[in-house]
Image (spheres, rainbow, N blue to C red):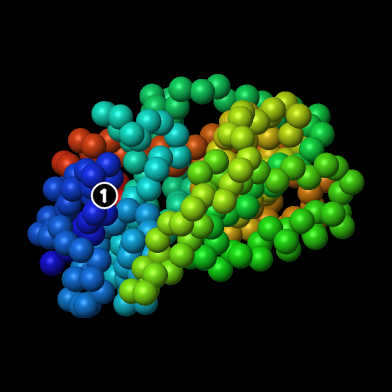
Amino acid sequence: MNYAVRTERVKTEKYVESAARGMPNCKLTNYETVLSTTDFDKVVFMGVLRGTHLVYKHAQNNKKDFYYIDRPYWGESRATPYWMRCVKNEHVKTFVDHKPDDRFKKTFKGELKPFHKNGKYVLVVPPSHAMAKMFNGKDWLDNTLKILKENTDRELVVREKPYNPAAIIDGEGKMVPGKSENNQPAKPFEWDKVHAVVTFNSSITIKALTNGVPAFANFDNPCLPICEQDFSKIETPRYEDPRPVLNSLAYNQFTQEEFRNGYYLEVLDGR
């Protein structure tokens, strides 16, 4: 038996339903059903809110394969056709498996710029409240700013995720969204003025590297293989070709049809 966990939300249920159609012997159910048993092989779910963070930990603790769905690394997710990332046993892909460049070239609509090496400020992007609670990152920003201030005189600009609701644990143990606590304007970054991006798990590293800005990350991150993990080295970033990572990530997000026909499992299970 395999399970797909309902989101219980009209706008996102379609993603899990499509994944369930592509997974053999899969039952679409609620999170409580999954938590009540270990008699399953695989489980697919979206995000970490409304009970799915418990499913994530339940699968990890019981060594069950889980398939985590969330917004794509790039591309449209709210229209049709859409793209969504799907990661096996992680929340982002953290390794490079040397895929061809066909999917990246076909799907990435932006420009891949060379490193400019003349940026002025450091862009610091902390984890969202939900990710901080999920992965014990509540002290990340304070600890990071302390290290950076000890190792650079550059201006440090902190920018949160544009929509960043508080993460609250309710009476049933579910993580639920509260009021958004981010009052910063959602405006484009001036990438040509950024020396480096420093973050936790955010895919802002993809935007940075494709705009010629090196990245630092010290937790699971989609660009971790080419990010500097030692924040004390903020003045000496790694300038590595991002294309192998981007090619790899392109094989980690899928269309509605690729979920429905099971192609996502072929890729993620290495079949």
Q: Viewed as shown, does residue 93 lie left or right of 6?
A: right
Front residue (pair 53, 58): 53
Q: Which residue is denoted by mark 1 in the rendering?
A: 9
Front residue (pair 226, 85): 85
Q: Position of residue 109 (x, y in %)?
A: 46, 22
Q: Is residue 82 above or below residue 50?
A: above
Instruction: Name which residue type carries label 1.
Output: Arg
Q: Viewed as shown, does residue 91 lie left or right of 40?
A: right
Q: Viewed as shown, does residue 49 lie left or right of 34?
A: right
Image quadrant holding the N terminus, namely bottom left
Front residue (pair 200, 212): 200
Q: Viewed as shown, does residue 27 lie left or right of 166?
A: left
Residue ID at (78%, 32%): 119
Q: Residues within 10 Å of mark 1 (few under 14, many from 20)?
A: few
Q: Position of residue 113 (x, y in %)?
A: 62, 24
| Observer able to see residue 149 | yes
Circle 1 sits in a helix, a strand or a loop, which is it?
loop
Q: Position of residue 7 (x, y in %)?
A: 26, 54
Q: Quadrant of residue 25?
A: bottom left
Q: How many marks?
A: 1
Residue ID at (14%, 48%): 21
Q: Position of residue 262 (x, y in %)?
A: 19, 45
- Residue at the left extreme, as displayed: 25
| Observer able to see residue 241 | no
